[in-house]
Amino acid sequence: MEIHIAGAQHIHFAKIISQTIDDSARDRGTGIARRTPEYIIQKMENGNAVVAFEEDEFAGFCYIEVWGHGKYVAHSGLIVAPSFRGQGLAKKIKKKVFDLSLKKFPGAKVFGITTGQAVMKINSELGYKPVHFSELTDDPEFWKGCQTCKNFDVLTRTERKLCLCTGMLYDPEAKEKQPKKNFLNGLFKSKK
C-alpha cells in the first residue's frame, strides 16, 4: 500500500474518488458532501491532498481546505474504497493529512465535521476535541461546502449552530498550554 501527498501524477484517480464519495453517502444514508472530480484535481495539484493506492488501484483519499486566511485548516473528503476498508487505512491517511496540515500551516487550528464514529475515534487519537460549531471557522464559503449534504437543511434551520455532524478541533495553542504530566505529580499528595 502506498500513501502519498497527491500531485498532478495522481489526477487519474479523481473520478473514482468522486464516485466513491457519492456511493458512500448513498450507501450509508448519512450526510456526506459531494466533491466533483474537478474539485479533487484542484486539491491534488495544490499539494493539499493525500491519496492511497495499491498497484495503481485507488484505495483512499483525504484533502485539506484552508479558511480564515490560514487560521483554520479543515480535513475533508476522507474516503476508503470498499475493498480496502477494515484494514486501518483511514487512520493512516488521516495521520498523513494531519501531519501535512501541521507542516504547511503551522499554528492553524485543524478541524473537521463528521457523522462517522470511526472518524471521531481517529480524530480523538490525534488530539482533536469535540466542539460547538461556533468554535469552527465562520467563513461562509466553508459552510457552502455542506450544501450537497442531505442534512444541509438542519444546518441552515439552526443558523449553523447545530447539525447531525460533530465538530472536532485540534488547537495547537491549547496543546502547548497543557501542563506537562509528571510521574511525581500527585504521588506525594497528602490523603485526608
Image (cartoon, helix red, strand yellow):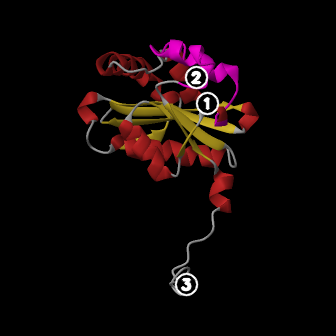
Mark 2 belongs to which amino acid?
Gln
Q: Quadrant of residue 117?
A: top left
Please rate how many residues cluster around mark 1, counting C-alpha atoms within 10 Å: few if below 14, some from 14 to 19, many from 20. few
Residue 119 pos. (x, y %):
41, 39
Comparing marks 3 and 2, which lies closer to the viewer? Answer: 3
Q: Residue at x 54, y 13 (%)?
A: 147
| Foreground pick, 25 / 185 | 185
Mark 3 belongs to which amino acid?
Lys
Residue 86 pos. (x, y %):
25, 40
Q: Is residue 48 visible?
A: no
Is residue 13 depicted above or below 168 in this figure? above
Q: Which residue is mark 3?
A: 189
Q: Which residue is mark 2?
A: 42
| Foreground pick, 106 / 141 | 141
Q: Which residue is mark 1?
A: 46
Q: Residue at x 52, y 12 (%)?
A: 153
Is residue 109 depicted above or below 125 in this figure? above
Q: Residue at x 42, y 18 (%)?
A: 18
Mark 1 belongs to which amino acid?
Asn
Q: Which residues are magenta?
A: 135-162
Of the image marks 3 and 1, the number of the one nearer the N terminus: 1
